[in-house]
Image: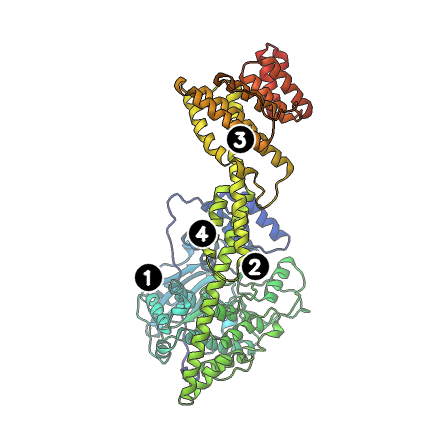
Amino acid sequence: MEAPNPDALGEGAGSRETQVFDVPPGFDPSGALAAPQVDELVAAWRRGERPRAEEILARHPGLGDEAAIRLIVEEFVLRLEAGMDVDPAEVARRFPLWRDELELLLDSYRMMQAGPAPDLLPGTGEDLAGFRLLAELGRGASGGVFLAQQPELADRLVVVKITPRGREEHLSLAPLQHRNIVPLYSAQVIPDLDLQILCMPFLGGASLAQVLDLLRDQPPARRAGRQLLDALDRVQARLPVAPPSRGPFRPYLARATYVEAICWIGACLADGLQYAHDRNLVHMDIKPSNVLLAGDGQPMLLDFHLAREPIDPGAPTPSWMGGTPGYMAPEHSEALIAVGEGRAIPAAVDGRADLFALGMLLDEALCGRSPEANGCPRTPLHRRNPVVSVGLSDVIQKCLQPDPRARYPDAAALAADLRRHLEDLPLRGVPNRSPAERWRKWRRRRPHALPRVRILLAAALTTAAATLLLWDAYRLRVHEIGAALASGRAYRGRHHYQEAAEALRHGLALAGNLPAIGSYRRALGDELALALRDGRAADLHRLVDLIRFRYGIDPPPPEEARTLTRRGRALWKARSELLAPGVGRREPEVERGIRADLLDFALVWVDLRVRSAPAAEADDARREALRVLEEAEDLLGPSPAIDRERRTHAGPLGRAGSSPTPSALPKSAWEHYDLGRSYLRSGQIAPAAEQFQLGLERRPEDFWLNFYQGLCAYRLGQYQDAV
């Protein structure tokens, strides 16, 4: 598509419009909860670092809305104090959750700090210095912008910008007469009000930031050039008069793709920058809010209040400097910090810094995201927006190189490459490294050549795309399986065994019959077995601890005893799994603990089973108790406590109560503990106390041995020993 010829067109201008929001009910701007984080942010800035509020919020995700807003406002204030030019609207766009509150707070702060007092600004309908103010277009930190008439010049419509006296924007703007730079008609000073008035032509339009903001809900890959005009007209509809809209630019934007429209806008802005650079002037603040799309669609550069001559590293340190975080080149940011600290400028800041900012602007317009504040190039643009070609992505990436020497040498070279891209010509500033793109450009230049090649190429591209989609789907599935395995391991490490089992089962379901993931499938199965085994062990330990405490003092009420009996019967059925070797190895101490829990559980459970059984079921309960004791002995080995319990329950049934394999005397602290508990349940306090004492001699720090020894001392009347 052929772009309009800029040499045959006139000049135009416009102004930025400011939105105003009401303060939401209950909003507390103090953000007292953020005090530690604010101190952290301030301390980092004093050390010469420049962290963003996002970095602090990421480390403190629990902060509430008010605290987060307080932190963001503090970063805004710190940047202003460091001499940076910060646009409140751009800061608000970084945090869409609190956008309305931030736009109001930040804009109000700048108005109170830097702009003229609100009562010093005239109102709509007043006359000021030969201008009749018709409507207020915007109000911000630097003053106000009004649509006005000049009665002395046939009521010509103009835009007047009213700022504090002493700003030198007019000195930078006055020498610039270019079709892509907003011209200055006149500048006046009103000494009585300490105000300065800049008069510029009125051609309607909107800032590129306003236009992009209206398109933000539409992904850049689905936008069209026509939508830029629609957004422009929506902004212009708020104006009290209809601006002129004729010219060749609107028809071009209406038929262009969105990428072509942004590419053309970038070329026009590069033309304007080259004109300013040729006159030894660097803009220093290229960003969407400083670009005007006039009513006829022509792009123009706005706001030269930070513009200055290039800065050499050997020159004296400037007294001031500004810029917008996220759009500043690395050397620009370093120079800004150096000025704030009174140090020498470390590297030259020239027109190539404007090219970096223009690259960030094009990147934002084509990917739909605001730039990072550190100014570092991100993933190449064509990987984030599939409709952007590799060549155009390389052009923008060249603008974003951290080293100025790796960027385009001047804005004219950038404008030439952008137009060569629009005209489907080979690029000169970057390698034409994509054969597919070179082929497409060649075919567009020669639309009637080799029609059969197009069919073959389409088939090849379709096959490649299908293969890529299948590969991406496979990689995504493998990634999800790996994430499920990692989640299961993390849950198991935190002893959340149910969640671990759910995550691992989900991973196995994802694995299915997927090829080439045998190691993942084995790892998931092993981890699931461990999670189930460890979960049962944890359930056992919790239940046994409950029984040790509740049953060690007095037998539980009948209903509670029956509940424990039912729950214990189900748990006992899984006893073999708790000690099965399976996968993984336990620590010896953990293994001994599980064995002690199982033995203690079996001894207490059989006693509860017999005690809680109705008289008519007593013999059945004793037979079940003897079976459980036999199973416990088979699983855990002979034990004096098991022998004693067996004799207790076998006698009423007329059976022999001794074990076929006589057990030895207790050898471990846990065997003394279990035997002591058996004596205690039968009311033999003194033998129980003796066994607990023998256990304490082996494990003096054990809680339960100390607990039951104290209980025995209490029941024996030895109160001093019990304490």
- Pick whichever, 500 or 663, lies toward us: 663
> Which quarter of the rendered picture does the N terminus lie within?
bottom left
Q: Name which residue type carries label 4.
A: Leu
Give coordinates of residue 531: x percent, y percent. Answer: 52, 43
SS at badge 4: helix
Whether the residues at callouts 3 and 4 have beta carbons within 8 Å, the answer is no
For mark 4, what is the residue? 105
Asked if residue 547 is positioned above or below residue 296 in the image, the reply reads: above
Q: Residues within 10 Å of mark 3 (few under 14, many from 20)?
A: some
Front label number (3 vs 2): 3
Query: Where does the image place residue 594, in percent across and percent down from the top left?
Result: 58, 34
Quadrant, the C terminus: top right
Question: Badge 2: few (under 14), some or many (20 or more) residues near its Cα, within 10 Å?
Answer: some
Could you tell me which residue is drawn at 57 percent across and 64 percent down? 376
Pair 3/4: label in front: 3
The nearer-to-camera label among 3 and 1 is: 3
Label pair 3/2, CB-CB below 8 angstroms? no
Q: Which residue is mark 3?
A: 631
- Label 1 sits on a secondary structure element that is loop
Q: Is residue 412 visible?
A: yes
Please tell me which of labels 2 and 1 falls first in the chain. Answer: 2
User: How far apart are labels 3 and 1 at the CA level?
Assistant: 99 Å
Residue carrying label 1: 125
Q: Secondary structure at mark 2?
A: loop
Find disc 2 in the rendering and name its residue: 83
CA distance for labels 3 and 2: 81 Å
- The residues tagged by marks 3 and 4 sit, at their Cα atoms, a distance apart of 74 Å
Pick whichever of labels 3 and 4 is earlier in the sequence: 4
Q: Which one is in front in this view, the residue at disc 2 or the one at disc 1?
A: 2
- In terms of sequence position, does the residue under pointer 3 or pointer 2 come before the other? 2
Mark closer to the observer (1, 4): 4
